[in-house]
Amino acid sequence: MSQKSYTGTCLCNAVTYRIDLPDSTTPKVILCHCISCKRYTGSGFSANIVVPKTSLHWTKGQPKLYMDKSESGADVPRKFCGDCGTPFTSEPSGQDEVIVIKSGTLDDQYRDECGELAMEIWCLRKDKWVEQMKDENITRLDKSMG
């Protein structure tokens, strides 16, 4: 079976990874609005892809591990760069064969290749301003204000 590789890194490039998936598989984006993901990413939600755990290979450095707790009290292992703090992964409880990759850590060309937004979870925790992102009256800039 033919495979496609996706690569990614943290902000400081101390930790890199590769994901090997069958050619026929296009990762779908899942947004999570749970409180833990908001705090973990420092954002209003976490943008993720879910892949088989066996497809993830750390190619440079090793991320640090933080054991979080879900709202139900289950352990949620989270891996991040120990140097710059970039969040890499979460492992949802009860789903031992998959791992959640923060899609912002994918290299540019691979982020563009991820499929469409497939799902949003923990929508009852969605910040009100997230819905306003659809508003046509919001100022949008191609680059920074500076």
Image (cartoon, helix red, strand yellow):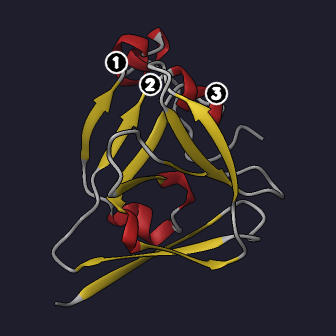
Q: CA distance from mark 3 to mark 1?
A: 16 Å
Query: Disc 1 or 2, which lies upstream in sequence?
Result: 2
Instruction: Kindly indicate the quadrant of the structure image that contains residue 40.
Output: top right
Image disc number at residue 39: 3
Horizontal relation, residue 94 to residue 46: left or right: left
Q: Residue at x 33, y 40 (%)?
A: 94
Q: Would residue 79 be visible to someone looking at this image?
A: yes
Q: Exactly how many numbered labels are in the figure?
A: 3
Image disc number at residue 123: 1
Query: Disc 3 or 2, which lies upstream in sequence?
Result: 2
Q: Do residues under tags 1 and 2 come within 8 Å of each other at their CB atoms?
A: yes
Q: Residues within 10 Å of mark 1 (few under 14, many from 20)?
A: few
Residue at which label 2 appears: 33
Query: Disc 3 or 1, which lies upstream in sequence?
Result: 3
Q: CA distance from mark 3 to mark 2?
A: 10 Å
Q: Residue at x 54, y 20 (%)?
A: 35
Instruction: Kindly indicate the quadrant of the structure image that contains residue 64.
Output: bottom right
Q: Residue furthest bottom?
A: 2
Amino acid tagged 3: Arg
Amino acid tagged 2: His
